[in-house]
Amino acid sequence: MATRAPPTGLPAKVAAVPPNQTLYVSNLPSAKIQKEDLRTALYMLFSTYGAVLDVVALKTMKMRGQAHIVYKDIQTATQAMRALDGFEFFGRPMNISYAKGKSNVVAKLDGTFRIPTAAARVEVTDLQQSIFNAPVPGAAPAAPASPSKPPGADHAMADAGPPEGRGVKRPREEEEEESDQDVAMEEESDEE
């Protein structure tokens, strides 16, 4: 089976990846600038060509010196890529191409976004279940479930007395004020 060569007149990187709303930018400075400053600078530069939906610039070892710029449409992404490819950004020429996949922002907008299923496949063992369902330390142990009371079953105890005498706070007995006989503390020294 023969492989198809890219059409003549187009650079190889444009023909290899189909046009996309997301641009992949590489050869960015990674040590000279903070992540938020890099995102802001990229947004300011790329937003001159159209509406930028998102700028993803990570500082992890795998993504260091790279970013993804998400545009609202493919035309503005293509225009920005053609104008800024090779543009010197903080002393380094940027390499810009179309991203291989669709951005999550674009997928959410067009309704094709799917939550990754890797987190849904987590199995919980019996030991983990017993740990998570254990009572909080220091808390009173849970009382066994008692049968529910029929309505109107609450009544005062026979020896509780009249309601006027219940729940009344007793007045505090006033303490006699101490006389002003403050005694000065003796200074002790460790030198003996």
Image (spheres, grey):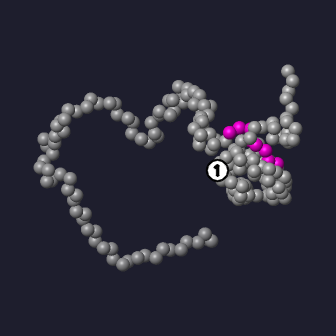
Left or right: where 176 falls relative to 62: left
Residue 27 appears at what percent x and percent y?
82, 50
Q: Quadrant where the N terminus lies?
A: top right
Magenta stretch: residue 57 in it?
no
Residue 8, above or below 55? above
Which is more toward the observer, 117 or 104? 104
Q: How many marks?
A: 1
Quadrant of the image occupied by residue 36: bottom right
Residue 165 appears at what percent x and percent y?
15, 53
Identity of the residue drawn at 16% across and 42% down: 156
Three-letter code, disc 1: Leu
Say what secondary structure mark 1 lies in.
strand
Residue 188, above or below 24? below
- Residue 64 seen in render: no
Identity of the residue drawn at 55% across and 28% down: 124
Residue 81 appears at what percent x and percent y?
77, 49
Magenta stretch: residue 101 in it?
yes
> Which portion, as a residue range, is magenta?
95-102
Which is more toward the observer, 131 or 9? 9
Left or right: where 182 falls relative to 146: right
Say which residue label 1 marks: 53
Which is more toward the observer, 30 or 66? 66
Quadrant of the image occupied by residue 170: bottom left
Residue 75, above or below 134? below
Residue 76 appears at what percent x and percent y?
71, 50
Identity of the residue drawn at 86% across and 32% down: 5
